[in-house]
Image (cartoon, helix red, strand yellow):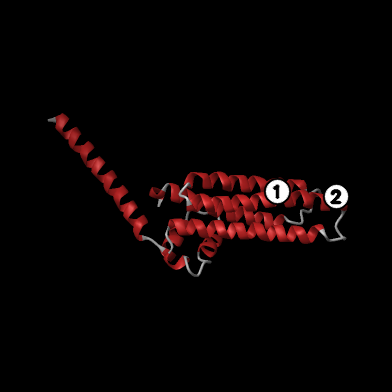
């Protein structure tokens, strides 16, 4: 009798666990657009920025699924990297900046190009369903931008605001990608 009771409780626990997973998967499949964005951004350290970023695509955001949100976050981060590159090009030609800083910016330009390329590689990996590679390219982009930051001498980093923004955008993309890879978390 006691053996049957233990078996019964194990069966009940398994049923409850399976029901919970089924509900989580159904929620994942049914959430989209604004409600999915709200849910995804609860996992982000920069919740308000996350909502702003993931809501920024007027065509994809309203009916977005996790894959769409991943593309949106990667594109916003890639656009930001392009902006940093443009700012770097302007600063390199600024005669008011010391030659050491200009040389650092020139070195930084190369690593920003790498970061920008790695963001595009992340998008390409998603398009061919190589979801695991996305994380690799995102981490490489973050490392490239950190190298850029370190190559500019002095305490007053003239690209620091842009670099902090890029980090935040990459972290949002990492959050969304983690959820895409492990949807049960939702």
Count of residue discs: 2
User: On the image, numbered disc 2 is attached to which residue?
Assistant: 100
For residue 171, the mark is: none
User: On the image, numbered disc 1 is attached to which residue?
Assistant: 111
Left of 184 or right of it: where is 13?
left
Image quarter in which the N terminus is found? top left
Local packing at callout 2 (Cα closer than 10 Å; few below 14, some 14-19, many 20+) is few
Left of 163 or right of it: where is 63?
left
Left of 103 or right of it: where is 31?
left
Q: Secondary structure at mark 1?
A: helix
Residue drawn where x is 44% and y is 51% of the image: 180
Could you tell which of marks 2 and 1 lies nearer the N-terminus?
Answer: 2
Q: Position of residue 69 (x, y in %)?
A: 48, 59
What distance separates the C-alpha of mark 2 from that of mark 1? 17 Å
Q: Position of residue 8 (x, y in %)?
A: 18, 37
Residue drawn where x is 52% and y is 60% of the image: 72
Local packing at callout 1 (Cα closer than 10 Å; few below 14, some 14-19, many 20+) is many
Along the viewing direction, whichever of 92 and 55 lies nearer the viewer: 92
Q: Is residue 61 above or below residue 184?
A: below
Q: Position of residue 134 (x, y in %)?
A: 52, 47
Are the residues tagged 2 and 1 within 8 Å (C-beta)?
no
Residue drawn where x is 68% and y is 61% of the image: 83
Quarter occupied by residue 18: top left
Residue drawn where x is 73% and y is 56% of the image: 159
Q: Position of residue 44 (x, y in %)?
A: 52, 54
């Amino acid at each position: 009798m006691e053996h049957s009771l233990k078996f019964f409780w194990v069966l009940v626990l398994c049923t409850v666990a399976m029901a919970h997973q089924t509900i989580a998967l159904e929620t994942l499949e049914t959430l989209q657009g604004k409600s999915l964005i709200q849910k995804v951004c609860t996992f982000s350290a920069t919740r308000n920025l996350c909502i702003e970023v993931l809501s920024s695509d007027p065509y994809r955001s309203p009916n977005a699924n996790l894959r769409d949100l991943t593309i949106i976050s990667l594109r916003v981060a890639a656009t930001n990297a392009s902006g940093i590159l443009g700012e770097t090009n302007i600063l390199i030609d600024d005669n008011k900046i010391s030659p050491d800083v200009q040389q650092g910016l020139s070195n930084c330009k190369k690593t920003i190009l790498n970061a920008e390329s790695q963001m595009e590689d992340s998008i390409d990996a998603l398009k061919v369903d190589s979801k695991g590679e996305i994380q690799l390219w995102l981490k490489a982009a973050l490392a490239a931008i950190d190298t850029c930051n370190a190559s500019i001498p002095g305490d007053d980093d003239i690209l620091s605001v842009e670099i902090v923004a890029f980090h935040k955008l990459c972290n949002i993309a990492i959050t969304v990608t983690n959820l895409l890879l492990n949807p049960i978390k939702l």
